[in-house]
Amino acid sequence: MRVVLAGASGLVGTALVAELVNRSAAYTQLVRPSSPNSPSQRTWDPARGVLDQTILAGAEAVVCLSGENVAEGRWTAQRKLALRTSRIDSAGLIARTLAQMASPPPVFVCASATGYYGSKRGDELLDETSRPGNDFLAQLCADWEATTKPASEAGVRVVNLRFAVVLDPAGGALAKMLPPFRLALGGPFGGASNYFSWLTLDEAVRMILFAIETPGLQGPVNACAPNPVTTGEFARSLGKAVHRPAIFPVPAFAVRALFGEMGDALLLASNRVVPLSLANAGYPFRDPELGAALRRVLGGRLP
């Protein structure tokens, strides 16, 4: 198997490359012109719409994980523009290039996010048939997925993986949460009854590969564990995993004061998302329960 990958330097991309190496699978990384080159890297320029079709030719799959980190800093107008262009330019360029090829790779797996459903859905159970939200992140995800349509209209099987919060101590949300929890200063953000959808980094990689290898899977696919938890349950589980109490909730007004719109949309969100399409396709979940998942990913790394 040969995979062409955009966004290989991120948390999920780095883990995906490691698994491809472990499987002795061939891969090509798409990198910006200013990045150093290696035999596995080829340059492209999404901002200028430059992608050589020959890079994609002969691949069994194309995977796009490109996008600025939504949790880095306040969502100023400039930051929102960067969040949009980093996703839409990249995914759109790949989709258009695939549509122009006489013999494109058969599958295009493109990242999206459970933010598609909006941040204020309470305890509503959300699957791939649920309506989208109406906030900034929901619109961003909807537009992000829409950019892949040229590829699907050209006959490429497109899978839009709507990732929940990816948990791994090496980076992302969990890495930022661990220091206060290890100091016994952790607790839920806002109300403890908000819902939190999640998956481990290993599971994210397995879901990408499953999407590549499962011919019947296409369209929007929720990439998350089958058992979302409340933020109160999450705080208790993480506190238990690091052998510390988790009794210091962060009030909503403090989150909004510190992080603005980003904090309201991410840290105070309530999304009870379930992976219906993956379950129906027979995906074998490795980490379905939060407590066991946290104990596994934090094994050997506790203070």
Image (tube, rainbow, N blue to C red):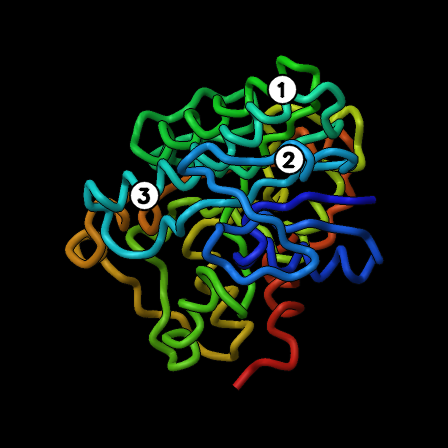
User: CA gap, disc 3 to disc 1?
Assistant: 27 Å
- Farthest residue to the top: give it: 153
- Decide if residue 134 is on the left or right side of residue 233: left
Q: Are marks 2 and 3 in contact (CB under 8 Å)?
A: no
The residue carrying pointer 3 sits among few (fewer than 14), some (14 to 19) or many (20 or more) residues within 10 Å by Cα, namely some
**Quadrant of the drawing holding the N terminus:** top right
Q: Specify the amino acid type for callout 3.
A: Ala
- In the picture provided, is 261 more to the left or to the right than 117? left
**Foreground pick, 264 / 83:** 83
Q: What residue would you read off at disc 2? A: 109
Q: Which residue is mark 1?
A: 100
x and y percentages locating residue 55 in the rendered image: 67, 39
Sequence-wise first label, 2 or 3: 3
Which residue appears at 28% of the width and 38% of the height?
Answer: 81
- Residue 189, image x and y in percent? 32, 57
Mark 1 or 2: the one toward you: 1
Residue labelled with disc 3 = 82
State yes or no: discs 3 and 1 in contact (Cβ < 8 Å).
no
Q: Which is closer to the viewer, label 2 or label 3?
A: 3
Q: Nearer the viewer, residue 107 or 131?
A: 107
Provide the secondary structure element on which disc 2 rests: strand
The part of the image, by quadrant, that contains residue 183 is bottom left
Q: Residue at x 19, y 40 (%)?
A: 77
Q: Are marks 1 and 2 in contact (CB under 8 Å)?
A: no
Mark 1 or 2, nearer chain start: 1
Horizontal and vertical percent for residue 238? 50, 67
